Image (cartoon, rainbow, N blue to C red):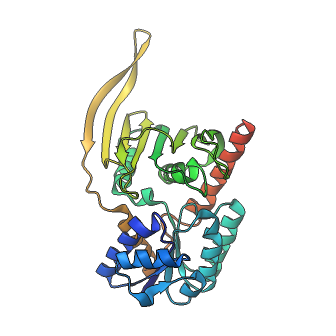
Amino acid sequence: MKIGLIGLGGFGGNAKLKAWKKVCEEEKHDLYVCEANASRLNDVSDAHNIPFERRVLEYSELVRLVDAVDITTPAETHFEIADTALENNVHVFVEKPMTNSVMSAVLLSGRVEETGKVLQVGMHFRYNKLTDKLKEVMDNDLGELWQIEGRHIAGKRPRLDGGAILSCGIHFIDLILYLHESKVSSVLSVSRNVLNRPQKPDEDISYVHLNFEDNVLATVKSSVIDYATGLDAAVPGINANWDFMVSGSKGRAFVDYAAQKLFVDTGYHKKENDAWKWVPVERKEIQVQTENVYETELREFIKHIQNNELPRANVYSSGILVQEIIEAAYKSARNGQEVKI
């Protein structure tokens, strides 16, 4: 298979290119790279030993050479590039957000249905081995689900194509939708642009509250200004915290995705002498054999193409539904009101 990586700035030219190189070498695929900046194209390609004949300046040319593309360009370009690839019968992996509007997400989903091609969104937490184990714990150990909370903190340069939700929180919004399949009934959000950045969206910190039809409450904190203690797996030398908590009637679970650890605290609340207390049953760390999640999701993308499967992070679940919630969050933050979905 011939695979083209589009966009070599930042994440694309670092963690993503390394992951693709390893996957393609091990599975015997041909890797092409595409970057509109000629100097960057050659500098990054030289550093990673990409043959000259597999370096392309224009994505419109690349889609005529390959079977699948991976789009790691700024968010506002995702729809146009993905649509062009699908028009040329090329499978698509696109980094989050899939598009920058619900309307364009719906249009892209229609193109996927027309062409029958695979489109996978880069929501890598769905493919993390810790997530698989957490889902198992939620199903078997925590009882009735009460609350979910995610804290996605990135102590790095804020993105120029979006605010903290697109940089950080979108991952945990998507993860919550994967772990809890009840429908979101409303969204309430508060955001602040403390750095006075000019772009839109512009939030540096945001709290997004999701109310589900079954009364489960979920909250996602997104921030590019907080103190962070973990390490960002995608950007070397940058601190980040990716903490995720789930509470139920029979226990609680905590996942530290940056440190790759999962803790489970089972027990129950009991009223005694007119006061509630927590009665512990067992507290433990569950060991999970982790791996490079970028390599994992890329291997899954190839497998989905070969088997003609709908990806776990697909155009509907990780594209349209996530974009609906993000747009509701922006509207809620602007108007100071809860938004019905």
Q: Residue furthest top?
A: 273
Q: In this view, does 107 lie above or below 53?
A: above
Q: In this view, does 274 lie above or below 116?
A: above
The residue at the point 55 percent across, 68 percent down is 73
Residue 234 seen from this side: yes
Residue 303 seen from this side: no
x, y (%) of residue 317?
A: 56, 60
x, y (%) of residue 35?
A: 52, 77
Where is residue 196, by image quadrant?
top right
Front residue of 33/312: it is: 33
Q: In this view, does 292 lie to the left or right of 243?
A: left
The residue at the point 49 percent across, 81 percent down is 68
x, y (%) of residue 173?
A: 54, 49
The residue at the point 66 percent across, 54 percent down is 324
Front residue of 210/235: it is: 235
Q: Which residue lies furthest to the front in this view?
A: 39
Where is residue 272, by image quadrant?
top left
x, y (%) of residue 10?
A: 46, 63
Q: Is residue 261 above or below residue 64?
A: above
Front residue of 141/238: it is: 238
Question: Total label count?
Answer: 0
The residue at the point 41 percent across, 46 percent down is 240
